[in-house]
């Protein structure tokens, strides 16, 4: 009978520890998973051709750009201010498609960035993406504002 009680006590203790472990780790999900689950999901599908205006405030890409995307790639970029004109001249490949911006957002979320937020238009395309990989670091923040989005034939 003592062996039966010891075994029951052991199983009871094991079950309690498992329950506590599950409660403290949310049964396999992390706080990032929970935060990501609360993030609005867009059902927007990037068209192969569209145009948009990007206002970017990052260490690498700063300024306002008119962007035309054809066949899923940036086909034309016009800088609308002094900074963006210089960037188009010196670093044209840095101007992203909206799809690339969304990939960057998803990467920041998967890497547990301190900030990885987006606001979406009624059709689901992003209108603002805010990123900060480490709130204690400088020069890693990014703010992208997307306006004048218009799908185009092609």
Image (spheres, grey):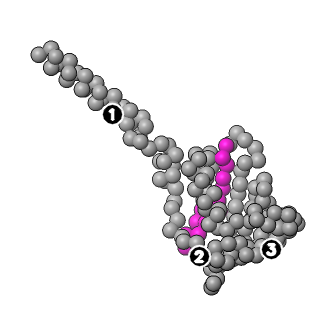
Instruction: Look at the image and tell me in which quarter the C terminus lies.
Output: bottom right
Label 3 Cα crowd, 10 Å radius (few <14 / some 14-19 / many 20+): some
Q: Quadrant of residue 147?
A: bottom right
Residue 38: image location, x then y, percent: 49, 53
Residue bearing mark 1: 19
Image depth: mark 1 or mark 2 in front: 2
Label 1 Cα crowd, 10 Å radius (few <14 / some 14-19 / many 20+): few
Q: Quadrant of residue 71?
A: bottom right
Measuring 36% from the left and 31% from the top, which residue is drawn there? Answer: 20
Judge whether 115 appears above or below 88 on screen: above
Residue bearing mark 3: 78
Residue bearing mark 2: 47
Q: How many marks?
A: 3
Residue 17: image location, x then y, percent: 34, 28
Distance between the alpha carbons at the discs numbered 3 and 1: 58 Å
Circle number at residue 152: none
Q: Quadrant of residue 95?
A: bottom right
Q: Pointers 1 and 2 in contact (CB under 8 A)? A: no
Judge whether 117 appears above or below 21 on screen: below
Distance between the alpha carbons at the discs numbered 2 and 3: 20 Å
The reply to whether residue 84 is visible in this rendering is no
Residue 135: image location, x then y, percent: 68, 42
Q: Which residues are magenta?
A: 119-134
Measuring 19% from the left and 23% from the top, which residue is drawn there? Answer: 8
Answer whether residue 41 is magenta in the image: no
N-terminal of the two: label 2 or label 3? 2
Measuring 66% from the left and 47% from the top, which residue is drawn there? Answer: 133
> Dot 3: what SS?
strand
Farthest residue to the bottom: give it: 153
Residue nearest the observer in this picture, 97 or 136: 97
């Amino acid at each position: 009978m003592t062996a039966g009680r010891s075994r029951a006590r052991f199983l009871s203790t094991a079950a309690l520890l498992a329950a506590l472990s599950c409660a403290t780790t949310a049964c396999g999900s992390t706080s990032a998973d929970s935060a990501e689950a609360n993030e609005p999901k867009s059902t927007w599908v990037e068209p192969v051709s569209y145009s948009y205006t990007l206002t970017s405030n990052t260490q690498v890409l700063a300024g306002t750009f008119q962007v035309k995307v054809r066949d899923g790639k940036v086909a034309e970029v016009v800088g609308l201010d002094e900074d963006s004109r210089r960037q188009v001249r010196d670093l044209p490949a840095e101007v992203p498609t909206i799809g690339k911006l969304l990939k960057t957002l998803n990467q920041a979320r998967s890497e547990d960035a301190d900030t990885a937020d987006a606001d979406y238009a009624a059709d689901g395309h992003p209108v603002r993406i805010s990123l900060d990989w480490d709130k204690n670091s400088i020069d890693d923040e990014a703010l992208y504002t997307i306006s004048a989005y218009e799908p185009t034939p092609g």
